[in-house]
Amino acid sequence: MTRDHGAVLAADARTMAECADRLRALAARLRTHDAAPDWLFTALHEHITACVVASEELAEAAARLRALADGPRPPRGRR
């Protein structure tokens, strides 16, 4: 079960990284439009940063859960 949770977190990490990539592409497209206000780029940058941080933290949590799942098992009847 721990490994399953790790897999879900790893998938979530990839989703957040993909979100950051999509936001970067959007920001690049919007930079070609003079009508896009500066505050929009500030907001996009903040969202990109949040996605990147979340992706890194989720990936770390997934790795730790995988390591826990692969580690030694406690003796039966003891936890």
Image (cartoon, rainbow, N blue to C red):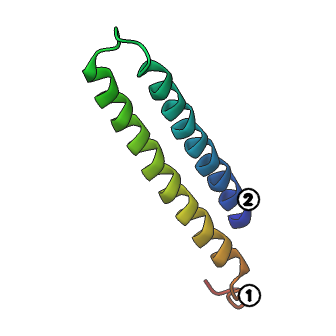
Q: Looking at the rendering, which quadrant does residue 47 occupy?
A: top left
Question: Who's the residue at 26% across and 21% down the image?
Answer: 38
Query: Amino acid under label 1?
Result: Arg
Give above or below for 42 relative to 51: above
Q: Which percent across, then down, holds residue 22? A: 56, 32
Using residue 23 as the reference point, say whether residue 64 is left or right of it.
right
Residue identified by numbered label 1: 76
Mark 1 and mark 2: span between their CA atoms? 22 Å
Q: How busy is the neighbourhood of tag 2: few (under 14 within 10 Å), some, or many (20 plus)?
A: few
Give above or below for 10 relative to 51: below
**What label does residue 14 carry, if any?**
none
Which mark is first along the chain, 2 or 1?
A: 2
**Depth check, front residue: 17 or 12:** 17
Give above or below for 59 relative to 64: above
Using residue 19 as the reference point, say whether residue 78 is left or right of it.
right
Q: Which percent across, then down, holds residue 26? A: 50, 25
Q: Residue furthest left?
A: 39
